[in-house]
Image (tube, rainbow, N blue to C red):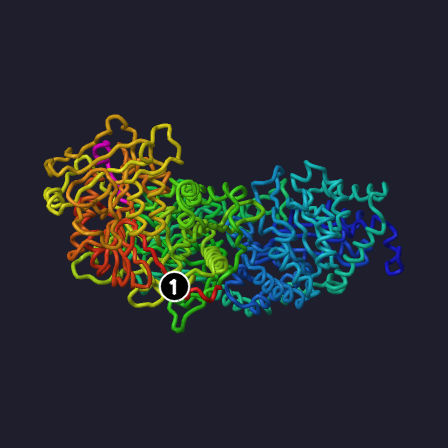
Amino acid sequence: MDADLDPLWQDMDWAIGQMLIMGWDGTEVTPQIRELITDHHLGSILLTAKNLKSAHQTAKLVQELQTIAHNAGHPYPLLIALDQENGGVNSLFDEEHICQFPSSMGQAAAGSPDLSYQLAKATATEVSACGVNLILGPVLDVLTNARYQPLGVRATSDDPQEVSQYGIAAMKGYKDAGVATCGKHFPSYGNLDFLGSSLDIPIITQTLEELALSALVPFRNAIATGKLDAMFVGGCGITNPSMKVAHACLSEQVVDELLREELGFTGVAISECLEMEALRTEMGVRTGTIMAVQAGCDLVLLCRAYDVQLEAISGLKLGLENEVLTKERVYTSLRRVLKMKRGCTDWAKALNPPGISLLKQIHPSHLALSMKAYDDSITVMRDNEKLLPLNESMHQEEELLLLTPLVKPLPASAMTKTILEGSTKIRSENPIHDKWIHRERSAIMSGEGVFRELGRSLARARHGKLLHTSYTANGVRPVHESLIQRASTIILLTADANRNLYQAGFTKHVAMMCSLLKASGHKKNLIVIAVSSPYDFAMDKSIGTYICTFDFTETAMSALVRALCGAFTPHGTLPGTLRKAPRKAVQSSAGGKSKTRTQHWLVEPYDIERDTKGLQDLLFAMVRGSAPNHQYFYAFGPHSFSLLSDVMTMEQQQHEEEDKKKMEEQQHFVVRNSSTGALYGFCSTYYLPSTFTGIIGAIFVDPSKRNLSIGYSLHRRAVRNLLQKHPDIKQFQLGCCLPGIFPGIPLDQSDALSMSSAITPGSTTSSTAASSGLKSWFSTTCGWDLSPSSSSSSVVRTRKIYNLLLPSLQSWSSPPDLPTTLQLAGISFDLIPGGGSGRTPNSTPNSPLSAEQESVLSFVSSHATPEILALYRLALLQSPPYSSSLSYSSSASPTDPTSYNNNHHNNHNNNNTWIIRAKIESQSPPAPGVVEGGGGGGGGGGAEQVIGTIIISSELGRDLHLPSLSSASASSRGGTGGIIAPVVSSMMGQQQTNANLLVLQGLVMLGLRQNKREKMASCLLNWVSNGNGNGNGNGNGNGNGNGNGNGNGNGGGGSGSGDGGQQQNNSVETLLGMGFEVQQVWEEVVNGVEQFASLA
């Protein structure tokens, strides 16, 4: 033994006793705990709520324990440890003498590290007056997956720097009050996986590198201050490529190597309670105790079971006897423990705690501090309808309904105290100290009355009638419906709804009821209040008014009542990544714009082998979270984004080198969890060399990960990659028609319906309806210019793209005058199948295309974007290899729907994909952009010129990557036919608009007839669009496209020059007049490359 240690410690029984921290059940000293102190020289005690009834009783109990130790010859006082985190985790509760303060997350919401310091100092002063000299805090965990971690509001946030800032402030407050500190829970309880362990414990799956970038940051920063006395090491498992640990506190790799060597911690390491069921059944407490000391722990915790505690003591003695443990190792821990004792206690202080006399003096000031802290922590995340304060949104005579979940009272509450005082002692077999689930499960269980006083206080404060009832996992019952009908305002409380899913379901049901009642003219205001985790509905924008309190103690509920009734304006902010911008006050007088906080996520190239499953899971999540009119998303999968390479494979077999490059380049990106393989976001990009256009085809973000800057990071990487890889790039396009997942920014139904206001003669601009949230995000966050092209030089083109549905095809009939009008105009049509001339059912894709098919591709190439051209090639090349032509007969009755020659249909009735050509007889050389038709139908006179095309397909929705078509077909009884990508020439003579509309009507009419002949029940018309170009490029437009066109008006589905707004209105209105309904609508935007020059 070294000379710096008292000779007493030569007795290893004394030394071993200083390496243990133990507790017991009961509010008085028992023979067992007395024996542990006197006979086994136990040096540290953990007090829990089951030991403590009041401040006075606590002071007397601690004084008795210290007296026992002193009389037994202990050289140093006992360490008396306590959990007093505030919020819902306080072991000592006394309404008269001990103040309640907000939880760690609530303190961060108040926005002041200095306030956190004051609260910690006040807390430590109070417990120190009762004889406590070690607080098990601060909590230094980072909530990596904040929604699903049981720590909840016990942790500060998901931002490691914010956790560091507030953790260090609290640590300094404890120290300045003379109490020792213990950071927890090393290496992290904020990123636990509860599903990936074969043991009855959660695990950490992050690599050490990932932990170092996030979870370990607060621990490292706290250690660097030199004020952290102890570290609580958790019992979780760790599984990553470099570490396989069953229990962190038993691992030398975690304690000695990571905590001490890498982070430089020199204080006392305290183990998790070794009474854990998983540890006991796996290796036994005796072995576990030895392993904890071998790993580097200085204090081994055993919470309450006396027989287990004796087993641990015997284990250490046996380890020394068998030389599994060395005396040197024991003395190393002994020195650390004694150093901490010397820093926080002495016998004079330990035997004479100030107790009630001091608490009475400081209570008034601490009570005022508590009220201020809770008022500052109340956070209004959203109040879109200005429902706060209540006296300004509802009349006094109107009824207010309070809906609250059934929860168990918090340990630190008057109700719990009443229950405990009226019950007998209850012993539990499970350890209580810091089990990852214990705290939260004990707080969220069935029990009436927790919020009864809240209802009473709220009724008194507003001087009006209040209805109050609870809700359970049984959902919305008739009593709830009746009360909701009566009330004008409903206040609904949730407590960790992400883990108590019945609360989430109940809230959404009530929100839907309120929305429906409001739509029918009833006043139904809904206020949702998260009284624990703020993540319950933080991302759900459908909840218009959302308030967070961070705990539901009586003090917190009192502050909530004051906030609801206008006693003060809440100024709280949300933690970490939820704090996108400075707090949005209920009524803010501050001017100026708030700056959005963004994070930069690691964005990686998409790897088809590694990421396919993750992308499929992400797409499933998208389907679950998509709007009803976008449910067709279920029809596509990971393969949908690689269509272009499939098209190029076929092109390379049949087309010249310069044609091959039109759609050949693509690159996709992901944000992923490198540990689990889960994808949090995906972005597809394409490059069109023929037009020097970079395309953002799709951006998906997991609904549970939105508003964390993942989409921003994906977009930024995508744009930068296109700029760096293609120095010749001239423009960026938002939306892609092939693959047809997102032809543009999806607009909601209100945006689609608002188009009707623009469908009027003489309109020259696109709809000025309010932009959707997505449009705002692309504009403000990603930098797109979404203004009308005529008003901005950076906007090359904007167009709206529609999917239209004709729901009852079999009862539809042609417009009566249309066939005659087409005949008089000299417009004829023919049906072009896939495959080249002379192909047989045994032909291969290498067979040449027929002249008719080549004429289609030539026409589309001159009048549509490369995306649409690739779509036509795909339709032709994937169609059956036989011929089945259909031509309009000038001698047939124009009103007879059967007056079309179907020469081979009966022989090949399984051919379900065709191209219809519109042609006109020309008496002069074709004008620029007009293609001469190759043989096949139509009639007579001069050469025929192709003036329009359309694809008809009832089977190729999935093959053409048109999820809207394939899903509509799958969900429709009798099937849904498809009419895809109408392309109309812009060279139609003097009355271009009317002529273009006539051609479009003719193509669609024949498409409908053909689908009707195939017995389809309905028909979906894909990609009807308008052009709105400003002449800086190709203004695309289906139907009759281009606005202000000083160039070619090209479009996937028709084009033309002239006023784009007028033509959009005419084409859409014409098709609606034929019986179609708007199914989906998107807005495609093309910006000049200069818009993104800063990202180069």
- When the figure is inspected, residue 580 is found, relative to residue 673, above or below; the finding is below
| Mark 1, other Cα within 10 Å: few <14 / some 14–19 / many ≥20 | many
State the residue in front, 997 or 357: 997
Residue 21 part of the magenta-drawn span? no
Residue 1011 part of the magenta-drawn span? yes
Residue 464: give x, y in percent of width and height. Answer: 32, 59
Q: Secondary structure at mark 1?
A: strand
State the residue in front, 391 or 524: 524
Highlighted range, magenta: 1010-1021
Q: Which residue is mark 1?
A: 1088
Left or right of 30 on screen, residue 869: left
Residue 806: give x, y in percent of width and height. Answer: 22, 41
Q: Is residue 620 visible?
A: no
Residue 300: give x, y in percent of width and height. Answer: 73, 49
Image quarter hosting the N terminus: bottom right
Q: Is residue 145 visible?
A: yes
For badge 1, the amino acid type reads Gly
